[in-house]
């Protein structure tokens, strides 16, 4: 991502308790860690002070976000905080502001006037009220945490709002949050909660970030300690699974922002969202016997592989899938088994790095052979 | 890197048990498979090795074998191929073995035995072996464990180990 441009990420959901603030603050910390030259600013559009306690302190501030938005000038309120993150102190009375604001362009206008050149992460209230709408309008990318079926149903409202704004659905991505893989279903078609939600998200054709965040008591405990200072995952649990998952999410988010900077941005993303015919005999490797499984692949996209497997696989099972490069050599990607409509699918786990390049190569070759009409 | 270790036994010994002993000394992380001497071409060899390692004979064994090695490499595991009749392998198949060893990034290792120095030299040239540990003069049966230890150390450092069993 270019450090010289204002780029805004909003984290929004109409449902509370889905991990919005945890995602927002950790996204900021990981993005800054990934690129120490990138200025990162965090704003919180509700009256909770977690952002202040994590990055600074919770003392009343002479300039807070409500005052800044009222005055239209963010600059006096921006503070340098821990981890190289800048933040604007949250306001205990920000709720009153929604009575005064009628224009959803407010936040974007204020941010542009502030001259901030870098990333802005906006945490929102669990309500699609005017301030949250303003954050979604201001954002280049909105992340919508989904932890269960209720929050998935609520997530649709964010995509409907984008459509009302005349913006495409690709301006938002669902992030599966607080996923508890201990939740299993007797119905073999769905397997576990991850497979169930992924299947339902795909059925609704909602864009999804490939990596997800697991539920973890260790991560939840980072918000409660003697010092009353919430810790980001990178400091409090750097060796945890969630830390790796967040790194993957941030990598994907920064890649999406970078691709949206390019004009015309849409082509690579459009290609990545489409499924292209990919009729190949492939193999995958699994933990259980038989360890090697043959696949008959039929289509491919950035998010996954459509295929039928020669052996019985469990929904949610993790496999190392070998795709065939145009050269004939294999490229391996980790994937999870997803079942829908009686067939099998392989949902890639957060393509990034080499895997991302391999997909670009494969999808590029497919598009080249088939032409744009196939997409 | 490849290694060439030569040792002699004072009486006729079979190559296979020596290779088994050597494999046992290489420790965990090595998945041991045996080269099927009936397999002549690379596809048949890859199919047989995959069948032993995974229980499946894939329809495209060369692609599947290359993918399997990448999979093992990602898990820091190795496939150790024991070849007890290197002399009987066709030159084209040896060339494939060499290429696969070199491209596997350490995921594939081979320990091979030959029956005399001349065939060892031929095989070494075809396998691209560069390091040679000289055969000690007058090695005796009681030195055998010691030389197995040396061979194991070489095998851990090398992608290929060539063992010459003089009978």
Image (spheres, rainbow, N blue to C red):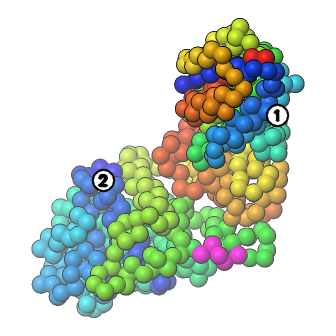
- The residue depicted at 82 percent of the width and 34 percent of the height is B48
Q: Is residue A326 left or right of residue B17?
A: left
Q: Which mark is residue A35?
A: 2
- The residue depicted at 79 percent of the width and 74 percent of the height is A187
Which is more toward the observer, A334 or A300? A334
Question: What is the x, y in percent for residue A246?
Answer: 45, 63
Tell me if mark 1 has few (under 14), some (14-19) or many (20+) residues whose alpha carbon lies within 10 angstroms of its own: many
Please identify the quarter of the rendering in which residue A340 is found.
bottom right
Location of mark 1 (residue): B48
Question: What is the x, y in percent for residue B90?
Answer: 78, 15
Question: Quick check: A97 above or below A265?
Answer: below
Question: What is the x, y in percent for residue A51?
Answer: 29, 78
Residue at the extreme top: B118
Which is more toward the observer, A270 or A198? A198
A310 part of magenta stretch: no
- The residue depicted at 82 percent of the width and 45 percent of the height is B55
Question: What is the x, y in percent for residue A96?
Answer: 27, 91
Regarding residue A200, the answer to whether it shows in the image is: no
Residue segment shown in magenta? A180-184
Is disc 2 placed on a helix, strand or loop? Answer: loop
Subunit ID for the residue under disc 1: B
Looking at the magenta stretch, what is its main secondary structure?
loop
Which is more toward the observer, A114 or B55? B55
Regarding residue A122, the answer to whether it shows in the image is: yes
Between circles 2 and 1, the one closer to the viewer is: 1
Question: Quick check: A314 above or below A306?
Answer: below
């Amino acid at each position: 991502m270019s450090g010289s441009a204002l780029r805004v990420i909003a984290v929004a959901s109409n449902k509370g308790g889905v991990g919005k603030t945890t995602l927002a603050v950790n996204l900021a910390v990981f993005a800054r860690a990934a690129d120490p030259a990138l200025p990162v600013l965090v704003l919180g559009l509700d009256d909770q002070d977690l952002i202040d306690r994590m990055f600074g302190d919770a003392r009343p501030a002479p300039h807070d976000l409500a005052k800044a938005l009222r005055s239209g000038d963010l600059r006096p309120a921006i503070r340098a905080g821990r981890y190289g993150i800048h933040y604007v102190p949250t306001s205990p009375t920000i709720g009153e502001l929604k009575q005064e604001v009628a224009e959803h362009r407010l936040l974007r206008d204020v941010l542009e006037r502030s001259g901030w050149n870098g990333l802005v992460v906006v945490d929102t209230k669990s309500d699609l009220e005017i301030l949250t709408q303003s954050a979604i309008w201001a954002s280049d990318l909105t992340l919508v945490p989904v932890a269960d079926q209720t929050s998935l149903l609520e997530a649709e409202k964010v995509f409907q709002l984008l459509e009302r704004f005349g913006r495409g659905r690709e301006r938002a991505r669902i992030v599966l949050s607080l996923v508890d893989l201990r939740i299993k279903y007797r119905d073999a078609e769905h397997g576990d909660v991850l497979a169930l939600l992924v299947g339902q998200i795909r059925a609704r054709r909602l864009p999804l970030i490939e990596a997800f965040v697991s539920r973890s008591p260790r991560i939840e405990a980072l918000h409660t300690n003697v010092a009353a200072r919430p810790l980001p995952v990178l400091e409090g649990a750097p060796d945890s699974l969630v830390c790796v998952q967040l790194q993957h999410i941030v990598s994907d988010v920064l890649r999406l922002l970078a691709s949206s900077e390019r004009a015309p941005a849409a082509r690579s993303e459009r290609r990545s969202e489409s499924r292209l015919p990919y009729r190949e005999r492939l193999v995958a490797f699994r933990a259980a016997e038989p360890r090697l499984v043959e696949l008959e692949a039929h289509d491919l996209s950035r998010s996954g592989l459509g295929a039928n497997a020669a052996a019985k696989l469990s929904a949610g099972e993790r496999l190392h899938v070998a795709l065939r490069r145009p050269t004939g050599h294999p490229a391996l990607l980790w994937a999870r088994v997803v079942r829908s409509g009686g067939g099998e699918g392989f949902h890639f786990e957060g393509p990034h790095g080499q895997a991302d390049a391999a997909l670009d190569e494969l999808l590029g070759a497919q598009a080249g052979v088939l032409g744009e009409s196939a997409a | 890197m490849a290694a060439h270790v030569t040792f002699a036994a004072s009486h006729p010994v079979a190559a296979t048990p020596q290779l088994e002993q050597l494999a046992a000394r290489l420790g965990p992380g090595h998945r041991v498979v045996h080269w099927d001497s009936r397999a002549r071409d690379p596809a048949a060899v890859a199919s047989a090795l995959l069948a032993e390692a995974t229980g499946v004979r894939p329809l495209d064994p060369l692609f599947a074998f290359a993918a399997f090695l990448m999979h093992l490499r990602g898990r820091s595991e190795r496939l150790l191929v024991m070849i007890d009749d290197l002399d009987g392998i066709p030159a084209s198949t040896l060339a494939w073995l060499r290429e696969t060893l070199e491209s596997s990034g350490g995921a594939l290792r081979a320990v091979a035995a030959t029956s005399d120095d001349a065939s060892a030299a031929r095989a070494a040239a075809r396998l691209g072996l560069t390091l040679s540990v000289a055969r000690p003069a007058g090695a005796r049966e009681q030195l055998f464990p010691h030389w197995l230890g040396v061979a194991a150390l070489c095998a851990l450092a090398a992608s290929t180990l060539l063992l010459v069993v003089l009978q």
